[in-house]
Image (cartoon, rainbow, N blue to C red):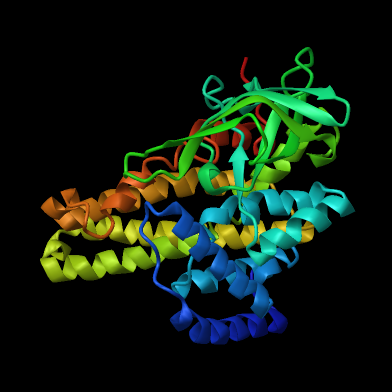
Amino acid sequence: MDLSYTPEEEEFRARLRDWLTKALPTLPAKPSPDDWPGRRAHDLGWQRMLYDAGYADVHWDASPTVRLIFLEETEKAGAPYVGANFVGLLHAGPTIAAEGTAAQRARWLPPILRGDEVWCQGFSEPDAGSDLAALRTRAWRDGDDYVVSGSKIWTSHAEVADWCELLVRTDPGAPKHKGITWLAMPMDADGITVRPLRTLAGSAEFAEVFLDEVRVPAANRVGAENDGWRVTMVTLSFERGTAFVGEVVACRRVLGELARTARENGRWDDPVLRRRLGLLNAEFRALWRLTQWNVSEAEASGGVPGVGGSVFKLRYSHARQELYDTAAEVLGPDSLDLDRPWVLDRLSSLSYTIAAGTSQIQRNIVAERILGLPKGR
């Protein structure tokens, strides 16, 4: 498989680097982590700058390789991440682009690209655990609407979202993977209650969402009724495909900073620590190559990432935890100081083996869909 870049792709990289050099110094200061209205405004302002410069559509209207280059270069330059609208740009938007009708694409994609609207993800439920298909939030048809009741948890950025990509059960009598429907729910609809959740790191980017007979237009259904599990697999392929590209680049940068810090504070003299840093360097280089392979595969299959994203997600989750465990070794007693670099990152890294599909679920996907092993009973 060819992992090299074409002259056109390298020209895009050079043009993007030049624009970033000029644009980034003009950005306002980043707001406090607890100022969610301010963070929303900051992140959407950056998205508008990308839109005006012609770079906003890379998440779904460009080739996977161009998307990879964009995420790599913006992270290297220290540009803002997609932030408050990562669900819209990396999950819901690509899903609607791949599965939505022409009218749905026209309604929802331009506001996401312009930085006008924020999306959140209403997938997980308190009683479903890692088994997403066990969801029990119910929706029944009433004329031109679905009426939705139930609850969701770990709903990213629900408190500042305009829309929610929502999974509901529309046929309780069908096998659990067959009775699910994918809806776009307006977050200002009557009957929605949002309760923010505070994480171990002290942030509140997640929330519980309670739905009490919320009316969602049937026109907001993406895909056919009861075909939501297939549509969800498209969403998750993007979530586990290229959505972590910037984070791999960031981890490689942190690794270099760790090595420099270890040299400065004397920890570099520990041969065991040096060996761990060397292994992590090899690990993240391999993950970057795996990312390129997954992107090349997506390029050959119409732009939607394949199950190789689960291999990446599985290994990346553990490598990130190992990276920040090593950071704690380098910092020593300072690893307990929440004002030091990498300390909060270490706390947040604990969630990566759960978020976006647990490691156990990823192992099942790899075993069944890649290795062809039989399903467990």
Residue 156 appears in the rendering: no
Residue drawn 29% across and 59% down?
Answer: 277
Q: Nearer the viewer, residue 8 or 123?
A: 123
Q: Is residue 153 above or below residue 80?
A: above
Residue 259 at x, y percent in the picture: 25, 67
View extreme (front): residue: 190
Q: In this view, does 120 lie above or below 151?
A: below
Residue 320 appears in the rendering: yes
- Image quarter hosting the N terminus: bottom right
Q: Nearer the viewer, residue 142 or 333?
A: 142
Residue drawn 30% across and 51% down?
Answer: 344
Residue drawn 71% across and 54% down?
Answer: 94
Left or right: residue 258 versus residue 170 is left
Residue 299 at x, y percent in the picture: 74, 61
Q: Is residue 43 above or below residue 189?
A: below
Q: Nearer the viewer, residue 335 or 183?
A: 183
Residue 147 at x, y percent in the picture: 75, 25
- Image quarter hosting the C terminus: top right
Residue 148 at x, y percent in the picture: 71, 25
View extreme (top): residue: 173
Give the image quarter of residue 35. bottom left
Give the image quarter of residue 11. bottom right
Q: How many labels does the image show?
A: 0
Give the image quarter of residue 163. top right
Residue drawn 87% across and 31% down?
Answer: 144
Left or right: residue 2 versus residue 264 is right
